[in-house]
Image (tube, grey):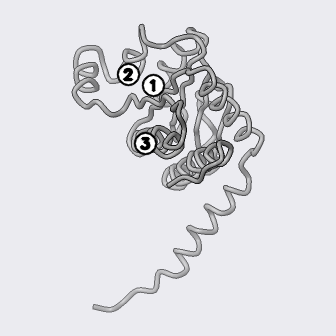
Amino acid sequence: MQKVDFGSKITEYFDAVTDVIGRLDKNQFNAALNVLLDAYDRRAAVYTLGNGGSAATASHIVCDFNKGVSQELDKKFRFISLCDNTASLMAIANDFGYEHIFEYQLEGRLRPGDVLIAISGSGNSENVLRAVQYAKEQNCTIIAMTGYNGGKLKPLADCSIHVPINDMQKVEDVHMIALHLMAQVLAKHFGHPMC
């Protein structure tokens, strides 16, 4: 089989990701870090959610905060993913509609001052928007992670990690980098490296 040289395509991908990282608003990262630190100090819960690749990101960051950042701390972070209970997700979707899968899980559980990390590449996922609207009604803080033009989600956020590129895979790449950055920064703030 003839080998193909994918070098130019690899470089193109890396260059696009590097470029968009350089255009991120660092002030929004700082604001989000302070929201998470404040939630930690108050023992508030931090809920994460998203669809598809964003659901995987939402689950991944729960692991990194509840284990990685928290492992040397007597008081732990309280991150909760709304994407991880397949039976609950399917029951809610079947009985009430897929657009309610996150909102329903928050009803009666959210406390004022809790935090919602809402991840949506398009910023227009109906189930994410419903959860965000409900959380805002409960006086919770919203950290939105979006791509493209930010969609309907971006203007609803208290902090907006917006990746301005029209490419879902690259948006998802940068969302994961952003969350890893926040985890490492907070771990260092508490005086220990992440493992």
**Residue nearest the viewer, comparing 70 with 148:** 70
- The earlier-in-sequence mark between 1 and 3 is 3
Please say if 191 is above or below 125: below
In-image side of 98 versus 29 (left or right) = left
Residue type (three-letter) at the residue carrying disc 3 = Cys
Which of the numbered marks, if any, corresponds to residue 126?
1
- Give the secondary structure at mark 1: helix
Image height check: is 174 above or below 155? below
1 and 2 marks in contact (CB < 8 Å): yes
State whether residue 37 is above or below residue 19.
Answer: above
Q: Which residue is mark 2?
A: 99
* Foreground disc of the pair 1, 3: 3
Residue 108 is drawn in which quadrant? top left
Q: Which mark is residue 63?
A: 3
Q: Residue at x 67, y 34 (%)?
A: 32
Q: Amino acid at mark 1?
A: Glu
Circle 2 packing at 10 Å, graded few (<14), some (14-19), many (20+), is some
Q: Are marks 1 and 3 in contact (CB under 8 Å)?
A: no
> Across the whole image, how many numbered discs are drawn on residues?
3
Label 1 neighbourhood size at 10 Å, few (<14), some (14-19), many (20+)?
some
Which image quarter: residue 43? top right
Q: Position of residue 42 (x, y in %)?
A: 61, 20
Residue at 24% from the left image edge and 26% from the top image edge:
90
